[in-house]
Image: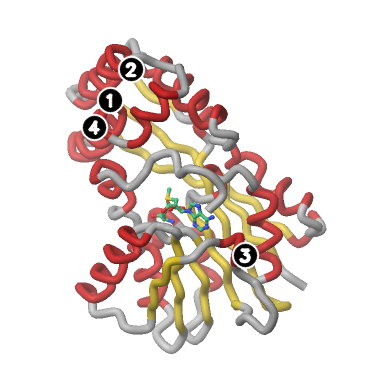
Amino acid sequence: MSGPYLHGHHASVLRSHSWRTVENSAPHLIPYLTASIRILDVGCGPGTITTDLASRVPQGFVLGIDPSASVIEKAKKHAEEKGVTNVRFEVGDIFKMGGEGEDKWDVVHAHQVLQHLQDPLGAMKQMIKLTKPGGIIAVRDVDYSLMDWYPNIEGLQEWQDLYIAVAQGLNADPNIGKRLHAVAMEAGVPRKDIETSTANWTFSTVEELEWWCELWADRIVQSDFKDKAVEGGHAKIDDLERLSKAFRTLEKREDGWFVVVHGQIIVHIK
Ligand SMILES: C[S@@+](CC[C@H](N)C(=O)[O-])C[C@H]1O[C@@H](n2cnc3c(N)ncnc32)[C@H](O)[C@@H]1O
C-alpha cells in the first residue's frame, strides 16, 4: 500500500461504503457490463460494488482486491449473504500486481481509490498493464472542492477546507475527480481513447440527510480522519467536535441539501 488510507475502516466509514451499488457508484460502467466479462475491482473495500458487479456478469467473474485484511473479510461475508458466487476477494495491493504471466482483465475498475494514493499515476499505469487490449479501465473519484450544500451552516466550509488540507498533507489529492483523464493521459493514453463524465450523490430528503450527515458527524470525531487531522496539526479535538456538530445541524434542516460531485473516466485500452 502506498501510504496511509486517510479514513481507515472505522464503522462510520464502512457505513458509507456499504451503501454503494453499481447504480449509485459506477453508472459509467453499466453500458460495458456484458454477461461473461472478467473484472478486477481495485481497492474494493467492503465489496458491495464488487458483488453487485458480479451479479451483473453472471457468466463472468470478478476479483476484488484491497490491502486491508479486515475489510476483505467483510467483503467475503457480504457476497455470501447475497448468494453471489462468481466473485472472489483477496488481500492485495495494486502496486504489487501485474507480474510476469499474470492474468489480464476485460475491465479494471477503481471507485474512490486514486484520491487516497500518493502515486495515482503509478496506480493508473498498473491498471493499464492489467487490462487486455480491447478492454477498459473505469475510474471514479470525488472532487472535495466541488462539494456543495445548502443552507450555509457555520462550520461546513471549515470542514471542507480541513478535509482538503488533511488529505493534501498526506500527499494525496482529494480533488482528483476533475483530472482523472489527465492522469490517464500522463500514463500514455491518447485523449481520444478516454471518455469523461460526472455524476453526483445528492442528499436532501430527511432520510438521505440523516444518513449522510450522521456518518460525517461520526467520522470527523471517530475515524482515522480525527487522528490524521490532529497529528498533522490541522485541528484540535474541540475544532473537530464543532465541525461534527455542523453536520448534525444540517441533518435537522428540512430544507437541507448536500451534493457530492464525482469525475468518471472510461479508458479504452488498444
Ligand atoms: C474509499 S475506499 C473505497 C472502497 C470501495 N471501492 C468502495 O467504493 O466502496 C478506498 C479503498 O482503497 C484501498 N486501497 C488503499 N491503497 C490501496 C492500494 N495500494 N491498492 C489497492 N487498494 C488500496 C483502501 O484500503 C480502501 O479500502
Q: Position of residue 257 (x, y in %)?
A: 32, 28
Q: Earlier in the sequence, mark 1 or mark 2?
A: 2
Which residue, given by chain and number where applicable, does mark 4 sit on? 218
Mark seen at residue 137: 3
Disc 4 and disc 1: Cα gap in Å? 19 Å
Nearest to viewer (mark 4 / mark 3): 4
In primary-sequence order, the first of circles 1 and 3 is 3
- Asked whether the beta carbons under mark 1 and mark 3 sit within 8 Å of each other, the answer is no
Viewer-closest of 21 and 228: 228
Residue ID for mark 1: 256
Q: Amino acid at mark 3?
A: Ile
Residue that numbered label 2 is attached to: 151
In this view, the residue farthest toward the front is: 231
Crowding at mark 1 (Cα within 10 Å: few <14, some 14-19, many 20+): many
Q: Nearer the viewer, residue 172 or 92?
A: 92
Q: Nearer the viewer, residue 269 or 69?
A: 69
Q: Residues within 10 Å of mark 4 (few under 14, many from 20)?
A: many
Seen at 60% across and 77% down, the residue is 106
Indicate the secondary structure of the residue bearing disc 4.
Answer: helix
